[in-house]
Image (spheres, rainbow, N blue to C red):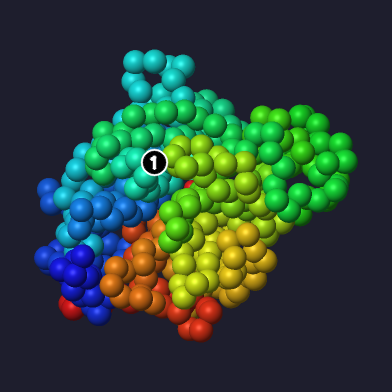
Amino acid sequence: MRRLTLLLLAPLLLPACGPKGEGTFAPGEIWPDNNGVHINAHGGGILIADDTYYWFGEHKTEGTAGNSAQVGVHCYSSKDLYQWKDEGIALAVVTDDTTHSITKGCILERPKVIYNRKNNQYVMWFHLEPKGAGYSGAMSGIAVADRPAGPYVFLKAIRPNAGAWPLNVQDIHRTTTPVDGSQTFSGGNLPTHPDSLNLLGRDMPGGQMARDMNLFVDDDGTAYHIYASEENSTLHISQLDEDYTGCSGRYARFFVNRFMEAPVMFKHEGNYYLIMSGCTGWAPNAGRSAVASSIWGPWEELENPFRGEEAELSFRSQSTYVLPLPGAPGRFMYMGDRWTPNDAIDGRYIWLPLRMEGKQPVIEWNNRTNG
Ligand code: GAL
């Protein structure tokens, strides 16, 4: 791990360089892989395995059709976070069965991979919307592999925590009438839901809605699924089972009616942190952050972690991952997406150092091009 650590420090000392030079990266520019092709791994995350970084993300295609999954989850590997080797498609959409959960044309977003040391398995979770139903499915897909880069085998699609009340359930959820099925929600920028709209109770039997999501593995090996639920209005933090392939039924709801999206969790000096966005679809908005000394809360909302010009737009990005740099405590890489929904494949990556100012995560722009 030491060799990796030394290599790692370079990107943070020289956070942004010319897009064409070797060992360089400029946030928001084309980022060529080892074949000279713009990296295609949107809404991504990082797995560290065998002294190598693996970057998994949504493979997008041209035009607006590229916003749904035409190919699958793309994987790249790197030793230094600058230069990325194309490892191919880690999880492919299914092309010969239109009824399959991950049939071509479904929506497959924000894939994340974690390693389960108990059974030596790599586990991928992603936000899944069955083909042809817009964003109404709000499901989670799960796939596994015995090698970091895959290929991953699709296991199942679920709505999390069916039949389980959250740890912090309120009486109102058990007693009020669930909203009726004809009630519709746009999912974004809504006026807050009155408590009488019992979305949690409505979804108890079949499982909770899960859209934007992330995974987090704690130091003790316990893994968590963090997802935007209840029509995006409320964030759920949910403990996974021992295999990491299902829910333990232990979960809690936070930031009620704050419409948090794009959640990212990391840990620093014993505290848990969340970076999140507001809920405005592909359009950027101001970032959000929060801290808790226990993963089960209470969570204290902090400030917008972005500082400077365009901070109110998160530098035109939306969070997707925060990478704690191995061997460099307190140093993190913020990873965000600059979406281009009219030509999905052209989406750009905004990776910037994230530092702590006391308990406040801070991300500042850096566009040096000749470092
Ligand atoms: C964003 C979300 C993306 C995608 C998009 C669709 O808010 O973070 O992952 O779902 O909405 O409009």
Q: Residue visible at 51% across and 84% down?
A: 358
- Tag count: 1
Camera sees residue 87: yes
Q: Residue visible at 39% across and 15% down?
A: 97
Camera sees residue 82: no
Return the residue at label 1: 124
Write down the quadrant of residue 122 in the picture. top left
What amino acid is at disc 1? Met
29 lies left or right of 136: left
| The C terminus - image quarter | bottom left
Residue in the foreground of this view, choosing between 165 and 343: 165
Write down the quadrant of residue 60 in the picture. top left
- Residue 330: x and y in percent read 39, 77
| The N terminus - image quarter | bottom left
Q: Secondary structure at mark 1?
A: strand
Give neighbour class at mark 1: few <14, some 14-19, many 20+ (Cα, 10 Å).
many
- Residue 72: x and y in percent read 34, 35
